[in-house]
Image (spheres, rainbow, N blue to C red):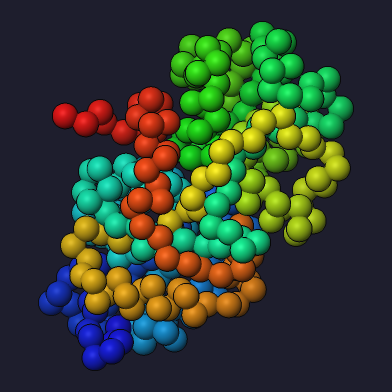
């Protein structure tokens, strides 16, 4: 791409020609079908802003994105906060942009249950924990696993998926699937990203009147867009300018119903580190 007189080659290859596409990865915060139209539009908008071919791919899992960032096989990735912290610890990846939703770059982890469930709080749910089927999202999800899992660990009812006090623990793989199994009452309670949940409600995918919130986490800084450690400041600024200019509703919708993209920095994610380390997702510092 060419921006401000700067030539940026794809995948960190300085010898690559301008025909080398920029590789952009997005983690599965929702199912692929829910996100594809917005991802196609994002690809177009980035190509227009950066004046280079861009390839936006929906990656199958968090670990694949971390490996790709660590080895600079991709130029830019949208990940959960914990996935960013893993990539930062392993290779020095940098957080550069996130999204604002309803005027705020923060979100929460919810633990929800069906409206017909007999509990109105997490405390009540845990009184019946031996009869409860509990759903997390992905193992690497900040709001779908790490933060609620840490809360349950601190309450003495969860160590890992094989050591817990529940009748059963499941991992659905994505927030929209968690919402669906809660609505169908295939599980008794589940952890879900607040921003994605409210976006599913706005899109008519989830009937909010059918679910209730048993627990809400402290505010969490939104999912970041990250780049490999070797990415130069001029390239980062070009990416940031491109995102800050995006206002297309199809793009904003798939990122939690965002109203804009805003800048992000490592300091915004320090509060999640304790939970990530306790859950064994980050190595303990030497």
Q: Residue 210, can we see it?
A: yes
Q: Residue furthest bottom?
A: 5
Residue 172 shows in the view: no
Identify the residue at horizontal 55%, vertical 52% (top origin).
106
Give 8 or 278, whichever is nearer the viewer: 278
The x, y position of residue 192, in whole percent, is 62, 39
The picture places residue 284, in percent across and down from the top left corner, at: 25, 28
Q: Is residue 104 rendered to the left or right of residue 199?
A: left
Residue, x 22% and y 51% (percent of image)?
92
Extreme residue in the left direction: 15
Tell me residue 200's x, y (percent): 71, 53
84 w.r.t. 54: above or below: above
Residue 121: image quadrant is top right
| Quadrant of the drawing holding the N terminus | bottom left
Question: Is 45 left or right of 32, judged from the image as shown?
Answer: left
The quarter of the image holding the C terminus is top left
Identified at 46% across, 19% down, the residue is 160
Res 241 quadrant in image: bottom left
The answer to whether residue 99 is above or below residue 185 is: below
Residue drawn 47% across and 61% down? 98
From the viewer's perspective, is 67 left or right of 184? Answer: left
Count of labels in the image? 0
Image spot of residue 43 (x, y percent): 47, 74
Q: Is residue 25 above or below residue 268?
A: below
């Amino acid at each position: 791409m060419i921006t401000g007189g700067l030539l940026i080659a794809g995948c960190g290859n300085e010898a690559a020609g301008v025909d080398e596409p920029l590789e952009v990865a997005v983690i599965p915060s929702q199912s692929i079908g829910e996100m594809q139209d917005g991802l196609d539009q994002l690809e177009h908008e980035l190509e227009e802003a950066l004046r280079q071919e861009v390839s936006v791919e929906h990656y199958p899992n968090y670990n694949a994105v971390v490996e790709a960032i660590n080895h600079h096989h991709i130029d830019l990735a949208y990940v959960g906060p914990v996935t960013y912290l893993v990539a930062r610890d392993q290779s020095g990846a940098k957080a550069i942009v996130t999204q604002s939703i309803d005027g705020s770059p923060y979100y929460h982890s919810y633990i929800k249950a069906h409206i017909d469930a007999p509990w109105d709080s997490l405390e009540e749910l845990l009184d019946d924990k031996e009869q409860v089927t509990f759903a997390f999202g992905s193992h690497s999800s900040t709001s779908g696993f790490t933060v609620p899992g840490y809360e349950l660990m601190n309450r003495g009812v969860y160590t890992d998926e094989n050591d817990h006090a529940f009748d059963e623990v499941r991992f659905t793989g994505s927030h929209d699937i968690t919402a669906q199994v809660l609505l169908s009452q295939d599980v008794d309670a589940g952890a879900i990203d607040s921003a994605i949940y409210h976006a599913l409600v706005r899109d008519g995918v989830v009937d909010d009147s059918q679910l209730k919130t048993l627990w809400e986490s402290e505010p969490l800084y939104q999912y970041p867009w990250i780049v490999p450690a070797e990415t130069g400041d001029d390239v980062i600024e070009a990416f940031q300018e491109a995102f800050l200019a995006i206002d297309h509703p199809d793009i904003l919708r798939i990122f939690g119903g965002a109203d804009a993209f805003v800048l992000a920095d490592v300091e915004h994610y320090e509060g999640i580190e304790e939970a990530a380390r306790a859950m064994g997702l980050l190595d303990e510092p030497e």
